[in-house]
Image (spheres, rainbow, N blue to C red):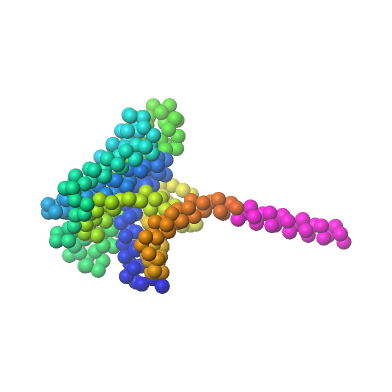
Amino acid sequence: MMSLYSFLSAIELGLIYSLMVLGLFLSYRVLNIPDLTVDGSFTLGAAVAVVMTLSGHPILGLFAAILAGAAAGFLTAFLQTKMKIQPILAGIITMTALYSINLMVMDDKANVPITQQESIYTAFGSLVGKQAQGMVLSLLILILAGAAMVLFLKTPFGLSVRATGDNESMVRSSSINADLTKTAGLMGANACVALSGAMIAHYNCYAEVRMGIGMVVIGLASFIIGEIAVGIFVKRKGVLSGVVAAAVGSILYRLIIAQALELNFSSSSLKLITAIIVALAMSYPAICDSIALFRKKSQAKSGKEKMGGNLSC
């Protein structure tokens, strides 16, 4: 059984990483763009937040991280829309460039701690208490970010962003600037990712240059798990259900990882576990279809056998 401490820690981390999954929901599901910038923009948000905290501005660092993430998304969108580079390659180029940029932000240090400075969690702890500071603040920021995304995607411009992901050719034929909607969507997505990285840096009290590696896979695994879980109760897919799926999936993924660690799986196996989760989650519809087909064949076969028995009598 999972200990209470591990359970609560997994939920806290799940709430923080939900912001990153929200960003992937916007780029991967709404815009239908496989954005690999996430690995770099996550670390960028952490690096900016840590540097701003060291200068005595932890709260301002969150807003700076959001702007930095939006700038990373703008660069990826520029490469896609103006330079006509394929989305995956554009994300790889930006991600590669961000590795060096992140090192520059952290003054060429691979790891920058903030253990001696006041983080956003310690500052917030004076209001709600140290026991609940992490969960309450993370939940509050997640609710604000999720509500902002739902409201944005329901505005006329947000509907254009959603239409661009559904059918870009139709959007362009309707005289809508698809390049602008793509840019806005990718900027918003990476802003969410960078905010998640900033909060993780405050939670762990450090930023590390390689902390964003694998975030795309983790985010996709979390979102697909959330879609499956939410889909059990909500059949109609929409923006609100997507935002809820991002949060639920992130928490469930963290609980799965926490349970794996409780079962004495080595930390080096976590990537393998993540890959298995992604493979199973993405193949879930095909598995369900195969099971349904097998049941139909079994029912048809049993029906034929009964019919044959009746004819023989």
Queried whether the magenta region covers residue 306, the answer comes back as: yes
The answer to whether 310 appears left or right of 20 in the picture is right
Residue located 32% across and 60% down the image: 13
Between 86 and 13, the one nearer to me in the picture = 86
Between 27 and 110, the one nearer to me in the picture = 110
Residues in magenta, as a range: 291-313
Residue located 55% across and 50% down the image: 286
Residue located 25% across and 50% down the image: 209
Q: Residue furthest left?
A: 55
Q: Is residue 265 above or below residue 152?
A: below
Between 52 and 235, the one nearer to me in the picture = 52
Q: Quadrant of the N terminus?
A: bottom left
Residue 113 screen position, x and y as percent: 18, 57
Residue 292 screen position, x and y as percent: 61, 54
Queried whether the magenta region covers residue 203, the answer comes back as: no
Residue located 25% across and 47% down the image: 44
Q: From this viewpoint, is residue 30 visible?
A: no
Residue 79 screen position, x and y as percent: 32, 33
Q: Is residue 115 above or below residue 161?
A: below
The answer to whether 183 appears left or right of 307 in the picture is left
Principal secondary structure, stretch drawn in magenta:
helix
Looking at the rendering, which quadrant does residue 257 occupy? bottom left
Q: Quadrant of the C terminus?
A: bottom right
Residue 16 screen position, x and y as percent: 30, 56
